[in-house]
Image: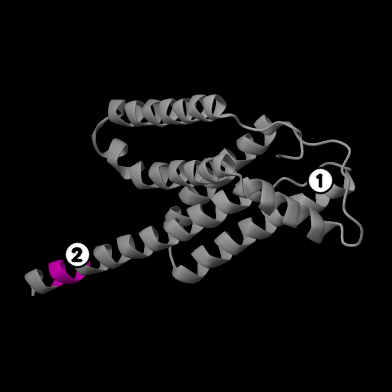
């Protein structure tokens, strides 16, 4: 059972999954409506962000995020069992999850160089982790498991995609130089 005292029933899980799939369908229809190359340029970043949010949502449905959040609460407030009087509203947590997942996927792919990408990724993870301490100081439950997992996964996938994209770009440049010679 979660800290808020509500347990997700199978009906609520089905409805939440239907909402997530509807959001995914809306994103894909908007991408298809964009003109030509602008449409294709951002599909990987959108897919990375969306799948990261879906990963966090799936872990939430399985109850794994509750365990992660309790571990984070224990590590933020060591000693006795931490009791936080005010939990955050769930929409705030998911808004943060969506914001971090999409922003890190667009930012990491948009930056050149592996070292810069890793620095950006680690910096965003530090910012999300710092959110737990701020929430604990405000006597709110530090439920940042979803945003942290989504940011971690989005950053990792964006780094892999960005490096593959850079290798393809380098191969094209090398092939053009060989053809010109």
Q: Is residue 9 magenta?
A: no
To which residue does mark 2 refer? 172
Q: Nearer the viewer, residue 79 or 51?
A: 79
To which residue does mark 1 refer? 135
Up the image or down, 49 lies above or below 127; here it is above
- Which SS class for mark 1? helix
**Residue 174 as seen in the image, left or right of residue 145:** left
Residue 60 in sight in this render: yes
Q: Quadrant of residue 31?
A: top left
Residue at x 58%, y 53% (from the top left corner): 149
Residue at x 62%, y 52% (from the top left corner): 148
Q: Which residues are magenta?
A: 173-177
Up the image or down, 124 lies above or below 94; here it is below
Q: Is residue 175 magenta?
A: yes
The mark closer to the camera, 2 or 1, is: 1
Q: Nearer the viewer, residue 106 or 24?
A: 24
Query: Which comes sooner in the sequence, label 2 or label 1?
Result: 1
**Residue 152 as seen in the image, left or right of residue 166:** right
Q: Quadrant of residue 120?
A: bottom right
**Residue 175 as seen in the image, left or right of residue 27:** left
């Amino acid at each position: 059972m979660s800290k808020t005292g509500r347990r997700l029933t199978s009906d609520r899980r089905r409805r939440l999954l239907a909402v997530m799939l509807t959001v995914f369908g809306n994103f894909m229809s908007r991408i298809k409506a964009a003109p030509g190359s602008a449409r294709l340029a951002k599909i990987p970043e959108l897919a990375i962000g969306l799948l990261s949010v879906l990963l966090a949502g799936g872990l939430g449905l399985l109850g794994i995020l509750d365990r992660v959040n309790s571990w984070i609460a224990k590590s933020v407030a060591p000693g006795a069992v931490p009791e936080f009087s005010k939990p955050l509203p769930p929409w705030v947590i998911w808004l943060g999850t969506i914001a971090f997942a999409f922003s890190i996927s667009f930012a990491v792919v948009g930056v050149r160089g592996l070292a810069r990408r890793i620095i950006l990724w680690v910096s965003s993870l530090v910012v999300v982790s710092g959110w737990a301490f701020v929430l604990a100081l405000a006597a709110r439950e530090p439920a940042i498991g979803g945003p942290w997992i989504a940011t971690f996964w989005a950053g990792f996938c964006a780094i892999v995609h960005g490096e593959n994209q850079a290798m393809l770009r380098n191969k094209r440049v090398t092939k053009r130089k060989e053809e010109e010679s």
